[in-house]
Image: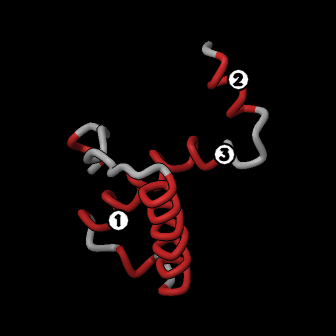
């Protein structure tokens, strides 16, 4: 385990790194099954707001762009 991985486990917001792949997988599964309505509009808005806020802060603050998700094709 690298030092950065240990730091994430002890970070108050480290859970986000663990939750992101599961959220990606679940969203794909819901869409493929035609069951997106199982997630409330409010939850979708909150997820989008959080993601956009983090994206802007990281891309502007770190002056970089993000590569496409490296998730397996089945998780996209």
User: Which residue appears at 32% of the width and 51% of the height?
Assistant: 65
Specify the label residue 6 is tagged with.
2
Q: Which of the two labelled residues, at mark 1 and mark 2, occupies the earlier sequence position?
A: 2
User: Which residue appears at 49% of the width and 55% of the height?
Assistant: 58
Q: Is residue 13 above or below residue 42?
A: above
Relative to the observer, which residue lies in front, 36 or 50? 50
Confirm or deny contact between disc 2 and disc 3 (CB under 8 A). no
**Which residue is the extreme one toward the top?**
1
Q: Is residue 69 above or below residue 51?
A: above
Q: Is residue 33 above or below residue 2?
A: below
Specify the label residue 15 is tagged with.
3
Relative to the observer, which residue lies in front, 72 or 64? 64
User: Label 3 crowding class (10 Å Cα cut-off): few <14, some 14-19, many 20+?
Assistant: few
Question: Of helix, strand and loop, which one carries label 2?
Answer: helix
Specify the label residue 56 is tagged with.
none
Number of marks in the image? 3
The location of residue 63, given as percent across then percent down, is 41, 52
Q: Nearer the viewer, mark 1 or mark 3?
A: 3
Instruction: Say which residue label 1 marks.
Output: 30
Confirm or deny contact between disc 1 and disc 3 (CB under 8 A). no
* Distance Cα–Cα, label 1 vs label 2: 32 Å
User: Label 2 crowding class (10 Å Cα cut-off): few <14, some 14-19, many 20+?
Assistant: few
Q: Is residue 54 left or right of residue 71?
A: right
Looking at the rendered image, the quarter that the N terminus falls into is: top right
The location of residue 68, given as percent across then percent down, is 25, 47
User: Which residue appears at 26% of the width and 37% of the height?
Assistant: 72
Q: Is residue 29 left or right of residue 15?
A: left
Q: Which of the two labelled residues, at mark 2 and mark 3, occupies the earlier sequence position?
A: 2
Q: Is residue 35 left or right of residue 1?
A: left
User: Which residue appears at 34% of the width and 73% of the height?
Assistant: 35
* Distance Cα–Cα, label 1 vs label 3: 22 Å
């Amino acid at each position: 385990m690298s030092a950065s991985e240990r730091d994430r486990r002890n970070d108050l917001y480290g859970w986000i790194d663990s939750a992101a792949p599961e959220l990606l997988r679940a969203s794909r599964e819901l869409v493929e099954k035609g069951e997106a309505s199982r997630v409330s509009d409010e939850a979708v808005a909150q997820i989008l707001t959080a993601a956009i806020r983090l994206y802007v802060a990281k891309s502007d603050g770190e002056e970089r762009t993000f590569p496409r998700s490296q998730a397996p094709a089945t998780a996209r």
